[in-house]
Each structure stands twice: as structure tokens, then as C-alpha cells.
Image (cartoon, helix red, strand yellow):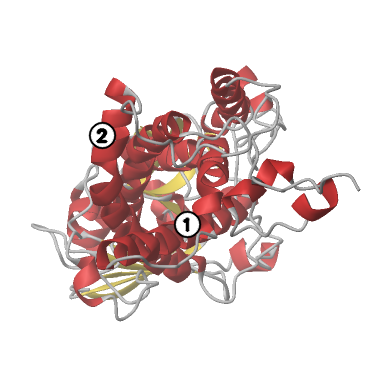
Amino acid sequence: MPERRRIRTLTDLPDSLRALRTPADPGFWRSPVRGARFTAVLGVVLLAGLTLLFVTGLLSYAAYNPDLNPVNDKTPGKGWLGFYLFSWPTGPHWLYRLTQGLHVTVGIVLVPVLLAKLWSVIPRLFALPPARSVGHALERISLLLLVGGALFEFLTGLLNIQLDYLFPGSFYTLHFYGAWVFLAGFVTHTVLKLPQAVRVLRNGIPRGEPDTLAAPDPLPATLSRRGALAMVGAGSLLLLITSAGRGFDGPLRRIALLTPRGGTDPGPGPNAFQINKTAAAVRITPADTGERWRLTVRGPAGELRLSRADLLAMEQHSAALPIACVEGWSTSDQLWRGVRLSDLAALAGHPDRPPGVFVESLQRSGSFRKAALRDNQVRDGRSLLALEVNGAPLSPDHGYPARIIVPAAPGVLNTKWVETLTFGEL
């Protein structure tokens, strides 16, 4: 009888048995690309990118002035999480265009990096036992918060960019609280793993120590780790090219094929620049904005009702300002012309130090049909109730007969189809 062959290692198993491995078995993961240095490079890129995302996200939220008035606040009950809020400035006038453009563009560009990083460490998500010590348990919990929070934030952010509001609630609320959950995991994981990542990048794996992220039974290599990093970088570059242009006019916008407000040209003419919602979409009709339309201005002086002709008869001022939206798209500076908000505040009974203003639109439903602006925004000489843009009357889709335009403010606070301005404490 021939001697029965002994199975000494996992590699001696027949293919039929090896296929029965579970994800908890280190031998289940066989890619030769995984390794500590590969993961460390991706981790350092994410450390810089995610930090920038969090900071610009906080700035975007602050730009909405959520502690000013309940209509601006989409996160009621935020408590101490609102500690960072401050009076959003009006200068430089392109501030929100820059911060939100960075927030969205960097988020899109980081998608391949995030997916590659999750792929590189996925064996650890299935490792048994779940916790070998208190420190290991803390690491696993932080990893779950980090992975879950990152996927949630990226998914909701990408859906919002595409204007697909498939959320079980307000995007602002979900994204805000999700960011804090993500931050808890991000900070904890960074504190625990950053020293190790820096050490690996500087000195490599110490001699005699195993690379715990490398496959114990790798398949033959078809791609080097440098090649894999190059592929991740190429994916990020492709996303940058096909998305970043939505914040610029001309050829760059036409190649921003992956984002709304990019790819298509809005056409010629003074009003030919991007919008989020049309007059028809919010049921604004010519009857609403025709000869019967009046702007109501309220304040200590009482209530005034002004026609468009009355407004055009007042002193007119111009300001070159962009439109910049939370989805990350923006226009170049458009030349707006109309009545300063500070002049309207003076008519309402605040001639010396204009306060904030509560703005109401003809739009009867939907988010931000009402909005509040701070006193510093009203006092800025570039803040207008605009009647014209680029030398022509506003089009219906751009807010005819009158709209708000304020430097550095998110697009949703530049209310269109204005019906009422109430100046006073907010």
C-alpha cells in the first residue's frame, strides 16, 4: 500500500478544500498587493484629504448661519456640536465658492483612495477573535466607526452632488451627524495607527517582524504595489478631470461630465449661467411676478409695498459676484445690479446700523424658501436686492422680479423671487 500523503500546511490542501476557507481565515485573502506599506501610503493620503473634508464641511455648515434663525438650522438640537459657529464673513466674495468647491472636489477625488484603503485592510474586519485586549477592542470599534462613517458620508455626499435626494430625512441633518460619528472613529484610529504608518513609511517592516497585512499564501503577482498605487492615482485624476470643471466656465465645465451643472452649456445671453431650480419647478407663474407683484418691506417704520418700478427708481448699485452651491458647482462672477439691502433697511427704519433681515420668497414649498441673513451681510455694500444681471433684467429662472445676492453666501441663501423683507432682530 502506498504511504498516505500528510497535509502539513494550508498550501497542501486540495483546491476543493481550500475553497472552503472563510473570510476569517487569513489564507482566504491571497492578493500579493496587500501589505503594510501599501496601506500606509493610502492612509497618509486619506489623513490629509479627510482632514480637509472635515474642516471645509464645518465651514460650509457655518456659512448657512444655522444659529441665526430656525429656518436656517437644519440640525435642531445640535447642542454643543455647534460650538464652532461664527458670523460668516462676506469677504473674500469667492470664499464659499472656494471652500465648498474644495469640499466636494476633494471628496470625489478621494473615492478611489478610500475604496483601495478599505480593500487593503478588509481581512482585519473579519479577524478572530474580535478583541484580544482592551486596546485591540478600541481599535476594532474605531475601525467600525471609521469605515461605517466614511461610507455613509461619501454615499450621502455623492448622492447630494447628483441631486438624488434618496435620504430618509434631511441631507443636512444626516450628513452633519454622520460627520461627527466619522470624526470619532477617524481621530481614534489616527491616534492608534499613525505612528505605525509613519514608521513603516520611513523604515519599512523591521527585520524579523511579519507584515500582518500581507497575504500568507499569495497568488502570483500580476501587478506590483507601485502599479496598484498608480492605478488608484489615475482613477482619482480621472475623477478630478471629469468633475472639477463644474466650478469654472468654458472648456473645463464642458468636461465635467460626472456632475450636474457641468458638461452642458447653458446657452448664450446675459442670463445664461447655471441654476438649481427653475421657476416652473417651484410653480412660479407669470401672474405671480407680473404687474401685481409688490415687494413688502417691514421694520420699525412700518410696512412698505414697492413695485419693481419703485425699486428701479431707487439708487442702483452693481456687484460682481458668483453663485456657489452646496453641491460644489459655481459660476464665475456675474455683474448684478439693484438696490442695496442697507438702503432698504434704512427705508424700513434702520438708517444707522442695519440689522439682519428675514427673507421670504414667492416659492410656497421646498427648502430655503425662507432664509435669514446676518447684519454683517446686510451692511456689506455688495449685498443687493438684484433686479438685473449682466446688463439685462433677471430671467424668471434667475429670480425675476427680484432676488437676493450676497458675497460669499451659499446659493440657497441668495433667495429668488423675493416677496418680503423683514429687518430686525433675528
Location of residue 216 (image quadrant) = top right
Residue type, label 1: Val
Residue 171 - label: none
**Disc 1 marks which residue?**
147
**With respect to residue 7, does 359 lie above or below?**
below
**With respect to residue 146, does 246 lie above or below?**
above
Residue at horizontal 53 percent and vertical 26 percent from the top: 248
From the viewer's perspective, tell me whether residue 174 is left or right of residue 18: left
**With respect to residue 304, does 40 lie above or below?**
above
Residue at horizontal 48 percent and vertical 47 percent from the top: 325
Outermost residue on the right side: it is: 1
**Disc 2 marks which residue?**
92
- Foreground residue among 412 and 259: 259
Residue at horizontal 24 percent and vertical 54 percent from the top: 378
Outermost residue on the left side: it is: 352
Q: Secondary structure at mark 1?
A: helix
| Residue 397 rendering spot, x and y as whole percentages | 63, 51
